[in-house]
Image: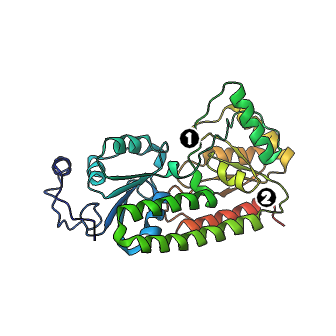
Amino acid sequence: MNVRRRRISGIAVTAATALGLGTLSACSSDSSAAGNTDKFDVVASFYPMEYLAEQIGGDHVNVTTLTEPGQEPHDLELSAKQTARMGEADAVLYLKSLQPAVDEAIAQSDVKTKIDAASLTKLEDHGNVEHDHDHGGEEHADEHAEEEHSEGGEHALDPHVWLDPVKYAEIAQGVAESFEKADPDHAGDYRKNAEALAKKLSGLDTAYKDGLKNTATKVFFTNHAAFGYLAERYGLTQEAINGLDPESEPSPARIKELQQEAKADGVTTVFYETLVSDKTAKTLAKDAGLKTDVLDPLEGITDKSKGEDYVGVMEANLKALETALGAK
């Protein structure tokens, strides 16, 4: 195949020595280390990218991830070993703007194939969650975004595209094309695997459309503003306690606003997630007389995840939404 076995670079040896790991070689017993296998070695920044690489690459790839299970990806800091591993990879797959430390390391890396998932679909501005909303759903969200821009307000583009199966499928197609170009010996298999993944994601999209078509309410509360793309895709309104940063603290005015909205919109449930504190969500739920449940932003799979992989957790999320929104 076209992917050759490399000699370890000076930076990898330096990093290994600094960490007391001994001498690295191309025959390292650590078969998971990028650059040390005869396969197409891919370093993925966090779980949604890891899943794509594994599904599309199949038996031809060796995938390692920079974000360990249970680690909050937004706060990732890279070790010298991880930076060295990235330098030895055939490709790196990441989502620019989600993890600043990863963006910086990739910019300085000489890895040949750099695949930015954010460039393979269109990122959107889902507005300021501290702003007052009426509840006109998707149409209002568009008006609100235009209003914010007209007032000169600027918000970061929302990076959570993987929670929309349609956008995730667009990214998957782009990843497959990058793999085919970088490792043409296995292009046919990459294409075949990508088609199989596209069918899975299409099925997931259909399940969400059918499951959320007729519900008692279209509004759901989340701890972290990760579900803007999902809400837009299926005609829902996400109201987040915090912003795009899951560790940010809501203002007292925001908490009061959400309590009022819960009554006005028939909200039954405050969703929280497994990788960050649920304290604020449970406090709001208690004060407003609401239930709590998990809506997983799929930033990592752990033993607490309600599913073994992306599709499994997305199916669990659908069930949770159907229950909370009163699907009929």
Where does residue 100 sit, x and y in percent of width and height?
A: 43, 40
Mark 1 Cα shell of 10 Å, populated few (<14), some (14-19), many (≥20): some
Task: Please state which of residues 299 and 253 is positioned toward the viewer in this rendering.
Answer: 299
Q: Quadrant of residue 203?
A: bottom right
Asked whether, in this view, residue 206 is left or right of residue 94, the answer is: right
Q: Quadrant of residue 217?
A: bottom right
- The earlier-in-sequence mark between 2 and 1 is 1
Task: Please state which of residues 101 and 267 is positioned toward the viewer in this rendering.
Answer: 101
Which label belongs to residue 125?
A: none
- What's under tag 2, amino acid-wise? Leu
Asked whether, in this view, residue 225 is left or right of residue 178, the answer is: right
Q: Secondary structure at mark 2?
A: helix
- What's under tag 1, amino acid-wise? Asp
| Disc 2 target residue | 325
Task: Judge whether residue 319 can be spotted in this image.
Answer: no
| Disc 1 target residue | 245
Where does residue 242 sit, x and y in percent of width and height?
A: 63, 40
Please state, as top left, top right, bottom left or bottom right, where the N terminus lies in the image: bottom left
Asked whether, in this view, residue 324 is left or right of residue 202, the answer is: right
Where does residue 46 sit, x and y in percent of width and height?
A: 45, 55
